[in-house]
Amino acid sequence: MATVVRGVILVGHGGIPKGCPQELVTKLKRLEAQRRAAKMPPSPEEIELDTKIRQMPRTPETDPYQSGLESVATRLRANLGEVLFAVAYNEFCAPTLEESVEKLIQQGATHITVTTTMFTPGGSHSEIEIPEILDHLKPKHPEIELRYAWPFDLNLVANTLAEQISRFS
């Protein structure tokens, strides 16, 4: 019987670092919209722009979102026990979900569970993009169990929000 090595990936939205030229983001978003409308794969220009923005240097001051997600990830990781762990971002920040999946597989993960900080239904990242990425990766790695821990139980989300509100009431 094969050894099960569990991995977890926390996916966040991703933020644009301060100092990133707005024209790069505008051009990237225009290229993404054109690609989606044409149902085509990303162009070399889109890939280059996406990579350039994702690879920009970041600090807690220039990208407070990344810093915040990393703080959540540290706390989540502490609650998971013996698992391989990675963070990923949907856009603007590295690593991508694909890169994090590949990293955990290289580290020996055989069962990878992906979750996100995006709790609410209706979001394109959580409802469409993350499942599409995982569906694309599954045939490349048929020996790996890839699961997506979504959608969230909205009663649990509401309870968490109610607890937060009571802390400030």
Image (cartoon, grey):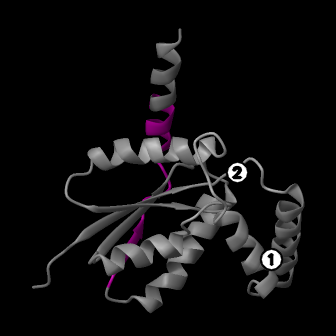
Can residue 156 be seen here? The reply is yes
Distance between mark 2 and mark 1 Cα atoms: 25 Å
Label 1 element class: helix
- In the displayed structure, 106 sits above or below 169; it is below
- Horizontal and vertical percent for residue 32? 81, 73
Can residue 43 be seen here? The reply is no
Q: Is residue 125 left or right of residue 160?
A: right
Residue 149: say if magenta: yes
> 83 or 48, which is in the foreground?
48
Task: Kindly identify which residue carries mark 1.
Answer: 36
Residue 92: say if magenta: no
Q: Quadrant of residue 106?
A: bottom left
Q: Is residue 65 left or right of residue 163?
A: right
Q: Residue at x 49, y 23 (%)?
A: 164
Label 2 element class: loop
Q: Is residue 76 left or right of residue 131?
A: left
First to last magenta residue range: 144-159
Task: Kindly identify which residue carries mark 2.
Answer: 17
Name the mark nearer the viewer: 2 or 1: 2
User: Could you tell me the amino acid type at mark 1?
Assistant: Arg
